[in-house]
Image (cartoon, rainbow, N blue to C red):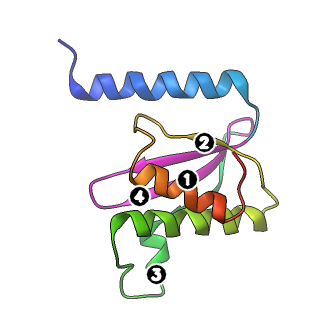
Amino acid sequence: MKSKRSREIQRKARTRVKIARISNLPRLSVFRSNRHIVAQIIDDIKGETVVAVSDKTLAKGKSKVSGPRTAVAELVGMEIGKRAKAKKISKVTFDRGAYKYHGLVKALADGARKGGLNF
């Protein structure tokens, strides 16, 4: 019987292989934990992270980013869209990893679209 973590790794690898096959654009990768959400734009050709935003980096100037978690995820998406536009990145491929396109991941994607990213 496979462990939960090994099944997650398989799902993530399956998603990344599909993305690598169809696109040479930068990849908008999402990581979601129980408390935080992180989005980063990765250039796989150069092997470097171009832009990264999390709810923790949004809270640096403020005491805390508050509200429902989906609203915070949307703010993270809008911020990564704004920072990507500053770096002249407008088209990316969306890498949801092992997560379903639902809830926080969907809210982040919608926020990134509002921020100016196309995918």
Q: How many marks?
A: 4
Which quadrant would the C terminus be assigned to in this image? top right
Q: Is mark 1 on a helix, strand or loop?
A: helix
> Depth check: 64 or 118 in front?
118
Label 4 vs 1, first from the N-terminus: 4
Residue 94 numbered tag = 2
Residues tagged 1 and 2 counted as in contact (Cβ below 8 A): yes
Label 1 vs 2, first from the N-terminus: 2
Q: Nearer the viewer, mark 4 or mark 1?
A: 1
Which residue in the protein does label 4 denote? 37
* Residue 70 image point, x, y percent: 39, 63
Q: Tell me the amino acid under the disc marked 3.
A: Lys
Answer above or below: position of 30 versus 55.
above
* Residue 7 image point, x, y percent: 31, 23
Label 3 vs 2, first from the N-terminus: 3
Q: Tell me the amino acid under the disc marked 4.
A: Ile
Q: Distance between the residues labelled 4 and 1?
A: 12 Å
> Depth check: 36 or 75 in front?
75
Q: Distance between the residues labelled 3 and 1?
A: 22 Å
Q: Tell me the amino acid under the disc marked 1.
A: Ala
Is 43 magenta? The answer is yes
* Residue 30 image point, x, y percent: 49, 48
Is 109 magenta? The answer is no
Which residue in the protein does label 3 denote? 60
Q: What stretch is highlighted in magenta?
A: 26-46
